Image: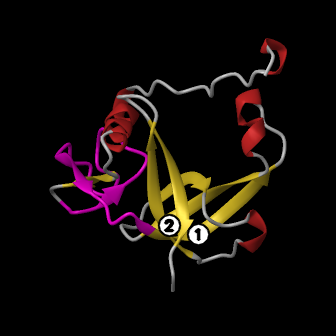
Amino acid sequence: MSEANEVPPKLIPDPDGRNADFYAHLAGGTLCIQSCASCDASQHPPRYLCTRCGSRDLEWRPASGRGRIFSWTVSHRPVDPAWAVDGPWATLVVEMEEGVRLVGGLRGLDPSQLRLDLPVEVEIEPATEAFAFIYFRPVPE
């Protein structure tokens, strides 16, 4: 491939704040959800206080990695040219068993076969020591 036709590398975010903690767990291969040790509520995105009781006693707990499709969109034109080879692709909103919703890409299914409430499981693709992409795959019902 000539230099003019080379696909640029995908932009890798550099998370900060509480998101950095979430993505550090992912980059290590584990999906963890922020939970309150005082009232047992789970929350995402991560915050500095519990959204239910206001406690600062928050911790990271390993998640089941399973959920159901809540919503999605299919993209045909990338903003970042590095994603052009992956298109069209679906971006999913998944309601996890823990009650929080996560956003990630779709793997293992053509976007035309998506349906609400489809059971899926997380697939983690580490990109750096501080970041990993989240994908979801359908699971047999």
For this view, does 114 lie left or right of residue 70? right
User: Do labels 2 and 1 touch, CB within 8 Å?
Assistant: yes
Q: Quadrant of the N terminus?
A: top right
State yes or no: residue 61 in magenta.
yes
Which residues, given as a range, are shown in magenta?
39-66
Residue position for label 1: 69
Q: Nearer the viewer, residue 34 or 38?
A: 34
Q: How is the image coloured?
A: secondary structure
State yes or no: residue 136 in magenta.
no
> Residue 13 at what x, y percent from top left?
52, 27
Q: Residue furthest top?
A: 3
Q: Secondary structure at mark 2?
A: strand
Location of residue 107 (image quadrant): bottom right
Residue drawn at (81%, 16%) of the image:
2
For this view, does 2 lie left or right of residue 101? right
Q: Tag on residue 110?
A: none
Q: Is residue 126 visible?
A: yes
> Residue 86 at what x, y percent from top left?
72, 44
- Category of crowding for the residue at label 1, using alpha-carbon neighbours closer than 10 angstroms: few (below 14), some (14–19), many (at least 20): many
Of pointers 2 and 1, the one earlier in the residue sequence: 1
Q: Secondary structure at mark 1?
A: strand
Residue drawn at (43%, 61%) of the image:
100
Q: Residue furthest bottom?
A: 141
Alpha carbon separation for disc pair 2 and 1: 6 Å
User: Three-letter amino acid code at disc 1?
Assistant: Ile
Q: Is residue 80 visible?
A: no
- Category of crowding for the residue at label 2, using alpha-carbon neighbours closer than 10 angstroms: few (below 14), some (14–19), many (at least 20): many
Residue position for label 2: 95
> Residue 4 at what x, y percent from top left?
83, 14
